[in-house]
Structure formats: structure tokens, C-alpha cells
Amino acid sequence: MPGIPGINGLRATDRALLTVNSSTGQLLEVPLHGGPIVVLAADLPGDGLAVGADGSVFVVTHPFNTIERIAPGGARTTIGSSANGVWGPTDIDVLPNGDLLVVQDGGAFVRLLPAPVRLLFPSAPYANAQLLRLRLR
């Protein structure tokens, strides 16, 4: 995708580096000790990511306003969206109790887009940047 940054977000596990690439829409696993790079998910324009205790990868998709969960087996679920207050998520972390902490720009990015492109996001709010805490249980 022209004009979109490449690698966003980087997290290390005991065996690999995980990253999302907004240009290719891929969640990648790069083995620390050699071997091929594995595509864990496609069609995922991610910005930031975090790894849960069970090995799930949580990816925020800015400016598409979602939080995606990719389970260890590869199943993908949208667990957050604009319907529950996710606006411009740029990074995510998993707290020790399993809750998710999400940094959001509150729709600021959308306001900076030129008018024709901004129309693709008609319901974006004009809110302040904020932290959002989500409980998964």
C-alpha cells in the first residue's frame, strides 16, 4: 500500500520476534535462532501488537479502529472496535492480570487526512488521545 509505513510494532518471545507490517498487512514471526519467517496472519494492517500469556497475539489496526486477537492456532477474532470505544489505536500491551491497555489517538489521524480520504471514516470522533483498558474476561 503506497504511503503506508512498513514495520510497526515489535515484540520478542523466547523463540521469535513478532512484528506487523502495515504495508503488506502481515503479522510475521521471525525465528531468533534461524529458520524461515512465518506469516501468522494476512490482511491485517496492524500498528502495534502485544503477546498474551497463552501465546495469543493482540494487534491494533490504526486507523481501522479494531483490536484483533490471533490465537496460537491461527484463529482470528475482532475483540474491540469503534462500537466499544476503540478510536485510532496505535499500540497495545497486556497487563499482568490479562487486561489490555490500548493507546489511542482519538481519531486525530483521520482529521489530518485530505477530505476525499477522510470520507472513508465518516463516524470517526474528534476526541482526545487516551488510554483504554479492556477486560477480556
Image (cartoon, rainbow, N blue to C red):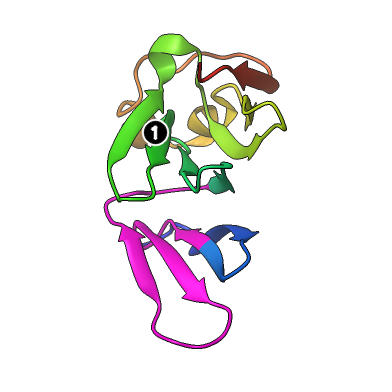
Judge whether residue 1 can be spotted in this image.
no
Q: Quadrant of the N terminus?
A: bottom left
30 up-or-down from 103: above or below: below
108 up-or-down from 40: above or below: above
Count of labels in the image: 1
Q: Quadrant of residue 101?
A: top right
Give the side of residue 130 with respect to residue 70, left or right.
right
For residue 64: magenta?
A: no
- The residue sitting at 43% across, 36% down in the picture is 114
Judge whether residue 39 can be spotted in this image.
yes
Residue that carries the numbered disc 1 in the rendered image = 64
Q: x and y percent of residue 74 in the render?
A: 30, 50
Q: Secondary structure at mark 1?
A: loop
- The residue sitting at 43% across, 59% down in the picture is 3
Looking at the rendered structure, the kind of residue marked 1 is: Phe
Q: x and y percent of residue 97 in the render?
A: 69, 26
Q: Quadrant of residue 13?
A: bottom right
Q: x and y percent of residue 25 in the render?
A: 34, 56
The residue closer to the viewer here, 36 or 116, is 36
Question: Where does the magenta region start and end?
Answer: 19-47
- The residue sitting at 63% across, 66% down in the picture is 14
Q: Quadrant of residue 53?
A: top right
Give the side of residue 135 with respect to residue 26, left or right.
right
Q: x and y percent of residue 46 in the render?
A: 45, 48
